[in-house]
Image (tube, grey):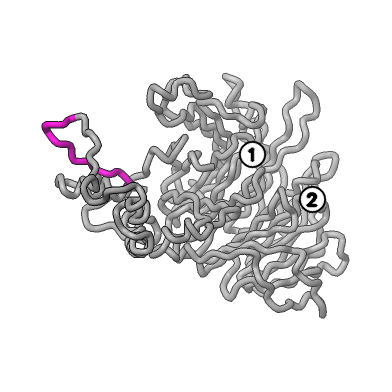
Amino acid sequence: MAKRPADSEQEQEQEAMKNGHRPMEIDPQNEAGDFEDEFEDEFESEDEILEAGVDGRPDEEREAEERENGMDIDQGTFIPGRHKLSPGETLNPDLSTYEMLHTLEAPWPCLSCDIVPDALGPDRKTYPATVYAVAGTQAARGRDKENQIMVMKMSSLSRMEKDDDDSDEEGSDDEASDPILETKSIPLTSCTNRIRAHQTPQATAAKPPTTLTAAMTESGQVLIHDVTPHLTAFDTPGTTISPAQNKPIHTIRAHGSNEGYAVDWSPLIAEGKLLTGDCSGKICATTRRPDGSFETDTALYTGHRGTVEEIQWSPTEKHVFSSASNDGTVKIWDARSKSRKAVLSVPVSKTDVNVLSWSHQTAHLLATGADDGEWAVWDLRQWKPSTGGGASQSKPSPVASYTFHKEQITSVEWHPTDDSIVLVCAGDNTLTLWDLAVELDDEESRFTAGMQDVPPQLLFVHYMEQIKEAHWHPQIPGAIMATGGSGFNVFKTISV
């Protein structure tokens, strides 16, 4: 991120130095800038020069000064969420660090969004890009009838403009264009706390896959919609959506009036199996039958002593899922258990555990994010089975933990194909990208003195007002969609 340009010539020079640019004074009589040997008369032999070091001083003296002053430039770097703007300053992104960056507005803020898989192909790297997604709004109090589920198509997402010498790069011949946001709205009378999409397999070549959404609402009801017609309408001119197609195909009322935030579809059960959790600590399972109808289990999963903040199915075990709660624990469950009790219960934070994510590449790794700003990675092989009907064990040690964020963690998600990359959203208006594989050697560590509170694993910081949730696009490597108080951001950095 970058602050506005400095006004005076001196400030501009200081700002340039902070950004890594080194001004060079050129003799007006020697515009070519010929090299001048400042040590020409000081040393008579090559051995004396080598002994004195590259700048004429002993190595020990020079290295001591580097350790003391090596981070002068970095200390001037503005870090969103950690530093405050001065009066009159504004924050703008450093566009050179993005491959793609687009901002799209919504009628109301959305707490949650989800990316919908499409038929445009995997591993897409050309531009302009297209993204299909769903989101649920949070209209202002007293205007609940303006709430909606937004089914979206974002197209003409062009890459950042490059210099002429980059014209041979893949996709760089695509002309820059303004992004286009098309929406199909499904009216609701309640805010959506969390929304997740699920896609069943394509029945035939002529029939597209069925796309379902589950929206956990503020009223406590979970609304399941078939948004297949809405998605089809984007690419079939003249298609209209009937009022009947905007109605939910199933409503889950098992949570009563308890609202909730935890929703997840099983990635391994094609027909569709849904888990939902509420503020009373109850977890409910709903299964889609072969005929398309739904059945909700009457027996609920119990054990959390507070709100179930997040639920996620195992990416490899068909009957296993995890849950996070504001009671500070993460629990692991077996959906086949008749007791409906957790098989593992681990305290991972002294504060609310808001979010979790299961690695799709290394299934024994689980990431969590808590209310105190800490996010951590856990090795499930170190967790021991619970005893006494789901009693918690002592807190194990995480594989890695970070306290860079000073506000609550609101979203965490592993990269879909790289088990060392994680994205994290926080209440400090930032989305950060992390590379857990980074380790500094002794030589590199010398130059990080003075920035011990900025972990070397931190790859990137993206600023977005009131950011709530973000997801990697599974078909566009490195692309991210985020939602927040200012609408949606769709971007891709050059670092991932």
Above or below, 435 relative to 399: above
Above or below, 155 relative to 258: above
Mark sitting on residue 316: 2
Q: Main secondary structure of the magenta part?
A: loop
User: How far is disc 2 from disc 1 in space, using C-alphas?
Assistant: 17 Å
Residue nearer the viewer, 275 or 167: 167
Residue 271 picture quarter: top right
Q: Residue furthest left?
A: 29
Residue type at numbered disc 2? Thr
120 lies left or right of 170:
right
Magenta region includes residue 27: yes
Q: Residue furthest front?
A: 45
User: For the point 71% across and 63% down, which residue is it?
Assistant: 379
- Specify start and end residues of the magenta stretch as a single range: 19-31
According to the image, label 1 marks what residue? 474
Residue type at numbered disc 1? Pro
